Amino acid sequence: MCRPFSQCIDYLESLYRHRHTCNELESFELAVCFQAFMLFLYRQNQNDSYTLNMRHAVELSIEHLKEHYANPWTVEQLAELANVARWHYTRIFKEITTQYPLDYLNGIRIDRAKHMLLASDDRLLDIAQFVGFNSEYYFNRRFKQTVGVSPGQYRRNHYRQENMRVFAPFLEDFLVALGITPVVQCSHSRWGKQDYLGLLHVPVIDIENEDIAVLSCHKPDCIIINIGFERWMSDDGLGRLAPTYQFPHPGEDWRLTLRKSAELLGRKDRVLDIISQYEHKASEAKRLLRQSVRTQTVACLRISALGISLYAGPDHGYTGPILYKDLGLTPHPLVLQLSWGARIASLTKEWLKLLDADHLFITFDKRHSSWEGEERSMLDWSEWQSLPAVQGGCVYEVDFLTWMNYGVISHGKKIEDVLRVLA
């Protein structure tokens, strides 16, 4: 867009008026006018690009701030980090967050302090210093301004650790592993709920069709979410309901998720045992599979009404790190070829014909189905029917939410499923 647009119109009208001139001087003036118009457009484009670059730099500094909130930041330091002039930085920051930089920073610190107040018995001074406040008095004042009560009163009002009411959508696996029962478990109208966790008597909230108002009826004391959950419920809405902590790291790092969950919920003493038990289970399974499967190839597919998707290799996705790293199974060459650097790759019929893996683990995603069982219609394709694993009876259907999960219990169930058919 040209700003001001009236100047753009002036150039165009002038060029149009003199388009048929035969006078040499006027022709020269016309050429100069055209060059001036080009310069005007170029500057507009340059300014837009510069503005976009500045905005991106500020956005990156905000992400850095979320990770390093305890540092003693000033606006000048943040602007220098983004390489943007201070007045530009403050303006763009407010456009993005609706807050001034230091107000936003203090908001992050207060949110983190809320978690620590609920998850530990640490002194207020220790909490204040941990989240970045140098003065307990200033911490108390800012906390009361933001939350409405003092930190001590907030701690008394909300919870004792053993009775904490936690909502952790799609992270319930980690709660159960730590010996905590969520106050409510998430469900999806097409996917169902995580039945493998055995939370038979825990209330359910349908994240696709029910909103924060429904969640508020369960009165959570603490909410834990991972990256991407905002597509179901907004971070801001959750934050107004209860202290909300978002894990910024990829789901593949389940050990870090477990440690962070334990830290928030006061169960750090259980983490080493949980990890040790899983690693022992995986090691024993790997030994057995080495004898039975040897160099036979494996792939994992997610099948929906939209088509067939291939899950990635040993570094990405719900299944690859377990199948190919922890269990030492051999991925079919297409796994590495098509999903390099990604978690999942869509398979065309042409690619599907090349998937001559010895063993296929498949799970069905009902989300996009227009009628019951539509996702299974893919199995009628001639390309599917001709696969060696299909013809050899080496296709194994697994539970969707058990396998489409990063939880430590989920990973243990995957190992059990694999051993059941391959050991």
Image (cartoon, grey):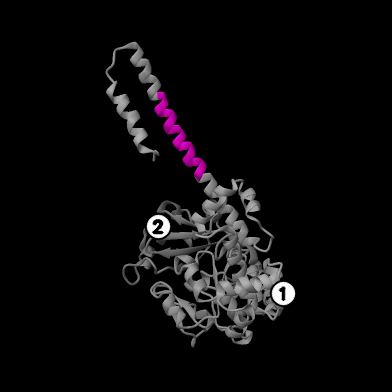
Res 305 label: none
Categorize mark 1 by other alpha carbons within 10 Å: few (<14), some (14-19), many (20+). Answer: some
- Where residue 283 appears, as percent x and y from the top left, is 68, 71
Where's the N terminus, which quadrant?
A: top left
Q: Is residue 258 above or below residue 184?
A: above
Name the amino acid, label 1.
Answer: Leu
Instruction: Give the labeled residue for mark 2.
Output: 383
Helix, strand or loop under label 1:
helix
Q: Residue at x 37, y 18 (%)?
A: 29
Name the amino acid, label 2.
Answer: Glu
Q: Is residue 48 magenta?
A: yes
Q: Residue at x 34, y 11 (%)?
A: 24
Contact, CB < 8 Å: mark 1 with mark 2?
no
Would residue 376 appear left or right of 118 to someone viewing this image? left
Estimate the spatial distance between the alpha carbons at disc 1 and disc 2, rounded to whole Å.
66 Å
Q: 366 or 353: which is nearer to us?
A: 366
Of callouts 1 and 2, the N-terminal one: 1
Instruction: Give the labeled residue for mark 1.
Output: 125
Where's the C terminus, which quadrant?
A: bottom right
Q: Residue furthest top?
A: 24
Q: Which residues are magenta?
A: 35-51
> Majority secondary structure of the magenta segment?
helix
Which mark lies nearer to you, 1 or 2?
1
Categorize mark 2 by other alpha carbons within 10 Å: few (<14), some (14-19), many (20+). Answer: some
- Where residue 78 appears, as percent x and y from the top left, is 63, 53
Count how many numbered circles sit on residues in the image: 2
Q: Is residue 218 above or below residue 224?
A: below
Q: Residue at x 59, y 70 (%)?
A: 111
Evaluate whether residue 23 shows in this view.
yes
Q: Residue at x 45, y 69 (%)?
A: 233
Q: 33 or 306: which is nearer to us?
A: 33
Q: 182 or 36: which is nearer to us?
A: 36
